[in-house]
Image (cartoon, rainbow, N blue to C red):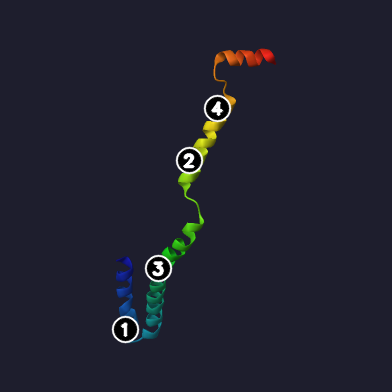
Amino acid sequence: MTMLSTVFGALPLILGGGPGAEARAAIGWVVFGGLGIATLFTLVLIPVIYSLLAPLTSSRAHAGIRLDRELRDAETETEPTSSKEAVQVGAAE
């Protein structure tokens, strides 16, 4: 809606006449063309690029699951299962 209102606001600059009309028409065409290209990029080109690149990456859910698994494995490797084992390990050294 903002883009449409700005483009329609630039139409009097493009279509107007009188003294200085050439300068106003140039400004109007810049606004009209710039917003048109920006809208095209925003609504069409960026989603197309995203849809082409998204399959090439892994989801973040997999990274969270892998991190949880690694943390669980690290906890079981470093912690003794009972206090007796901790005492025996300390005495054996």
Quickly name the residue at label 3: 44
46 in relation to 57, above or below = below
Mark 4 or 1: in front is 4
Amino acid type for the residue under numbered disc 2: Ile
Residues marked 4 and 2 touching at CB (< 8 Å): no
Query: Circle 1 sits on which residue?
Result: 15
Comparing marks 4 and 3, which lies closer to the viewer? 4
In this view, the residue in front, 47 or 39, is 47
Q: CA distance from mark 1 to mark 2?
A: 60 Å
Residue assigned mark 2: 65
Q: Which mark is residue 76?
A: 4
| In this view, 33 is above or below 66 | below
Question: How many numbered dots are placed on residues in this image?
Answer: 4
Q: Between tags 1 and 3, which lies in front? A: 3
Question: Residue at the location (34% across, 79% down)?
Answer: 13
The disc, 2 or 3, on the residue closer to the chain's N-terminal end is 3
How many residues crowd mark 4 within 10 Å: few (<14), some (14–19), many (20+)?
A: few
Q: Earlier in the sequence, mark 4 or mark 1?
A: 1
User: Relative to 49, is 28 on the left or the right?
Assistant: left
Place of residue 58 in the rendered image (x, y in percent of width and height, measured from the top left): 50, 51
Nearer mark to the viewer, of 1 and 2 = 2
Q: Residues within 10 Å of mark 2 (few under 14, many from 20)?
A: few
Q: Please tell me whether mark 2 or mark 3 is closer to you in this view.
A: 2
Q: How far separated are the C-alphas under marks 2 and 3?
A: 34 Å
Query: In this view of the protein, which residue sits in the foreground, 78 or 12?
Result: 78
The three-letter code of the residue at mark 4 reads Thr
Q: Alpha-carbon distance for marks 4 and 3?
A: 50 Å
* Measured Cα–Cα span from mark 4 to mark 2: 17 Å
Q: Earlier in the sequence, mark 1 or mark 3?
A: 1
Q: CA distance from mark 1 to mark 3?
A: 28 Å
